Structure formats: structure tokens, C-alpha cells
Amino acid sequence: MGVPLCRLPLLLLLVLALSPQGTRWPAAAAAAARRIAPLPTAALRRLYDTSNYGRLQLNNGLALVPQMGWNSWNFFACNINDTLIRETADALVSTGLAALGYNYVNIDDCWSYVKRGNKGQLLPDPKTFPSGIKSLADYVRGKGLKLGIYSDAGVSTCQVRPGSLHHENDDAALFASWGVDYLKYDNCYNLGIPPKERYPPMRDALNSTGRQIFYSLCEWGQDDPALWAGKVGNSWRTTDDIQDTWKSMTDIADKNNKWASYAGPGGWNDPDMLEVGNGGMTFAEYRAHFSIWALMKAPLLIGCDVRNMTSETIEILSNKEVIQVNQDPLGVQGRRILGQGKGGCREVWAGPLSGNRLAVALWNRCSETVNITMTLPAVGLDGSSAYSVRDLWKHETLSANVVGTFGAQVDVHDCKMYIFTPAVSFSASW
């Protein structure tokens, strides 16, 4: 008898996925990678519902973990050009962010000319991108990075540049010929056509190019894309656009939390890009923003000017231990487990990781410093067992093992993040 695919190690699945058989996984490897490994206890299975996990059918070999990189919109909006994109690629490398996994350099709206060419093709704006997109893609890829581009599942983009509705095949072929690695596909000027009809044609067009292109649906969560987009894209926006404010960030976290059971390797819920470093929130609020996005397995797409970051911004974005939570191969989205106090503002979020570990975030959404406590069974752990606890922001392991309960004092709007590991190793099937 052969070894069941569900028992193949992740490394072997990755080797299979990257084998030279075109841009599609071998069917058996794709099926195995979509299959969730069982969580180790009934309590964890109940809390971190994965009943919808594994129904992803896009199978383009991408998004085994959430995407990481940078996007131009949050800070620059339409004020973009060729030089900015090249300098951003340079900065991702020089700051060490690229080495941490931030490898997509994504151009948002306003890169294209205001009308199509004589043959109906998209054209780069000659004033801002005079060297063209292929030259830019070659430069970015020469840095070991990948270039992303933007279009719209409508007749126009949100900034009234040509959209790709009814031009899917031609535009996908053009993107592939330029060496594009990522497409963010927006939702403006959509003629009232349902998104379930507008988004699949671009999926099919991208697949037909023979090039692996990450497909990011930006449908704004209007038609509950978590329910259907796993068969269409590698990520799907579950919310409206994020703003650089505490209220916007927290509201979006709550909305995205609703869809936790629908994310997994191959396709991810997208609560929009990071605002860390843009100046509208405090250091504590940005730390909470980054922690919760990482725990939710959200895409980590930097939205600030990486050429001019403060030391605090770099400290947050380069926290390797928090990034590892986001990129954990188990791929189960963490979620809000409980809220305490007035309005439930003393929150506990958690999510299982590979290696029988659990990530826990204590998030203070109150207007004062508070103590946040929890029992271990509340987050799905064995209340009678001992756990080693690692503080991911202090980068230290607590001196004593934890049994039964755990808590910490958390400053206003701040977040503390930990990994719980059984103090005595045991065998469990993941």
C-alpha cells in the first residue's frame, strides 16, 4: 500500500507543488494540500471551526500561506510613478523586509493610461510609467521580488481608468507577457452584474496564460465572497477599504472575524492592507493592528512609504515571530474567543499553529489599562497540563510554565501576543 497523501510531510507537498508539470499542481498533491490536518483535541476543533476549510478549488499552486508585500494605495493613492516603484523595491531589500517574506511589490490604481490603445489594449501612463510595465517587472524580479498590478471587474477602475470587464483574456495575456505575478481586481463601475459572474472569467483568463499569477479579489465583502471565492481567487476582500484610524481598523477586524472558518491554504480572507506607519494611530494601536492581522492569517501588505520608516514602524513590521504566526503552514485563521468587561473590550483572540502550539493575543480595546485573564480551557487547551509561554513582542519565554489560567496587564489599545507550547512533548496527529 502507498502512504496516504494526508500523511505526507508539508515539505514533500511543496516539492510536488513546485514540480515542473506546468503551472498546476499534480492533482493528488493539490487535494492533499487542501485537506486540513486534524486538530489535536476536541476542544480545539470546536473552538476553531474548520468545517469549510479545504473546499478551495483554484489550485494554481499559490497562497499556501497568506501573501506578504507592499501596495501603493494607502499612502500614495494616485501619486505613483516608475521611480517610486523601483525605489520601493530597493527599500524592501535594504531594510531586510524582503528577506522576511515581503516579496510582492503591488502597483494599485492609476498606473494605466486613461483610455485603451488602438488595438484595445491597456497602456501604461506614458508620463508616469514611460519605461513600461515589463521593464519595471524585470527590475523588481531582478531584486528577487515579484510585481503586482491592478485592474477592475468593471468597465472602469475606481479612478476611472480602463477596467477589464469583457477584456479578461486580452488583459490577462498582456499581464503575463509583462511578467506580472499578482493581480488585485477591484469592483467599481461594474454595471450591476453580480460578482459571482464577473470574477470567474478573469480567473479562467489568468489560468489560461500558463503563468502563475496570484489572484486577489477586491469585492469589498458586498456579496459575502468568503462563501464562494475560494473557487475563484487566492484571497478575497471581506470588508470596505481600511482607513488609518483606530475605529476603522477595529471595525474591520470584527467583520473579518466572522469568516474565519472559510480561510485556509490556497485562499485567504482579506481585511485590507496594513496601515502601520502611516501616522493615524499610536504605536500601541499599530502593534495591535499587526498582531491581529497576523493571527487572522490576513495578507500582510505594507501600506506605508517603506523608503521613509521610523524605527517603531520597522520594529512592528519586522517582528519575525509575529510574522511566523501569520505564515504558519497549518493555515487556520485565528479568531476572537471571548470579551470581558464593559462592551467586551478586554478581548482574547487565539488560533492553533503547527507543532501542537496555540497563538494567543490579549487585546485591550478599552479606554484604560486593564488586566486580561483567561482559563486555558477557554482557548481550547488542557487546564491541567503545563504550557511553556513565549512572549512574541518581548522575544522571551516566561520563566515559569503556565497551568490552568493565564493573564497579563495590557496598556490602552495595545495587544500582547504569545505562543503556548505543551511543556511536555507528546505525539498528536496534525
Image: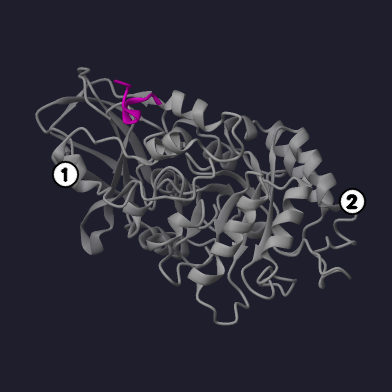
Tell me if residue 374 comes above or below residue 341 in the rendering: above
Which residue occupies 77% across, 49% down? Answer: 177
- Residue 205: image location, x then y, percent: 64, 57
Label whose residue precedes the other's in the sequence (1 or 2)? 2
Which residue occupies 66% across, 57% down? Answer: 75
Mark in the foreground, 1 or 2 = 2
- Residue 385: image location, x then y, percent: 13, 26
Residue type, numbered disc 1: Ala
Magenta stretch?
Answer: 1-9
- The circle on residue 200 is none
Q: Which one is in front, 166 or 45?
A: 166
Q: Which one is in front, 346 or 52?
A: 52
Mark 1–mark 2 distance (CA, rounded to whole Å): 57 Å
Q: Is residue 3 magenta?
A: yes
Circle 1: element type: helix
Query: Which residue matches tag 2?
Result: 131
Among the 4 quarters of the image, the one containing residue 408: top left
Colouring chosen for the image of the structure? one colour
Q: Is residue 422 visible?
A: yes
Quarter holding the N terminus?
Answer: top left
Classify residue 62 as left or right of residue 8: right
